Amino acid sequence: MQWAALVAWVATALGGLTLFLQWARHGGLGQREGIRAIRLLPHLALAAVGLCLWVAYIAADRRTLAWIAVGLLVVVALLGVLMLTVSLRGRTNIVRTEAPAEAIFPLPLVALHGALGATTLVLGALAAAGIGS
């Protein structure tokens, strides 16, 4: 289960990195509306730290590390839902004169990133609980 969680985590990270690069390339770091850096960068940083802790858990077989990584994933997921809400709200605002950087996100990639993130969270919690090992 721990390896399945790792694979899901890496796949989620690759999708998230793709979204981040698109967002940054289209002016996301400097935008004042929509998904701002103050929301996105903690999401990215906590996910990366959690992934590193997960690798450390696999290497050291310390369940405490697994639970800390899962706890971080919960925070990452909450930040992700917040950003999704902001992004969807921004797509429907027709008085906007300039589209935010995230308006170029392909919705299927956003959905896949979220689904993989949820899968990672479930697999991580199951592995941390010792189920499937």
Image (tube, rainbow, N blue to C red):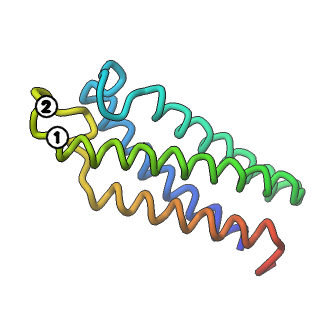
Tell me: 100 left or right of 13: left
Q: Quadrant of the C terminus?
A: bottom right
Q: Is 11 in front, or is 121?
A: 121
Where is 101 relative to 119, above or below?
Answer: above
Tell me: 22 left or right of 77: left
Look at 37% across and 49% down and name the residue there.
84
Dot 1 falls on a residue whose secondary structure is: loop
Type of residue at label 1? Asn
Q: Quadrant of the N terminus?
A: bottom right
Which mark is on residue 93?
Answer: 1
The residue that label 2 is drawn on is: 96
Binning the other alpha carbons within 10 Å of mark 2 as few (below 14), some (14 to 19) or many (20 upward) gives few
Give the farthest residue toward the bottom: 132
Q: Is 4 in front, or is 83?
A: 83
Type of residue at label 2? Arg
Tell me: 80 left or right of 110: right
Kindly report the distance in space between the C-alpha atoms of the residues bearing marks 2 and 1.
Answer: 6 Å
Residue 78 is situated, as x and y percent measured from the top left of the image, at 54, 49
Q: How many marks?
A: 2
Residue 38 is situated, as x and y percent measured from the top left of the image, at 48, 26
Look at 33% across and 29% down and name the residue there.
24
Dot 2 falls on a residue whose secondary structure is: loop
Do the CB atoms of the residues marked 2 and 1 lie less than 8 Å apart?
A: yes
Look at 53% across and 39% down and name the residue there.
43
Question: In which quarter of the view is residue 125 placed?
Answer: bottom right
Residue 73 is situated, as x and y percent measured from the top left of the image, at 63, 52
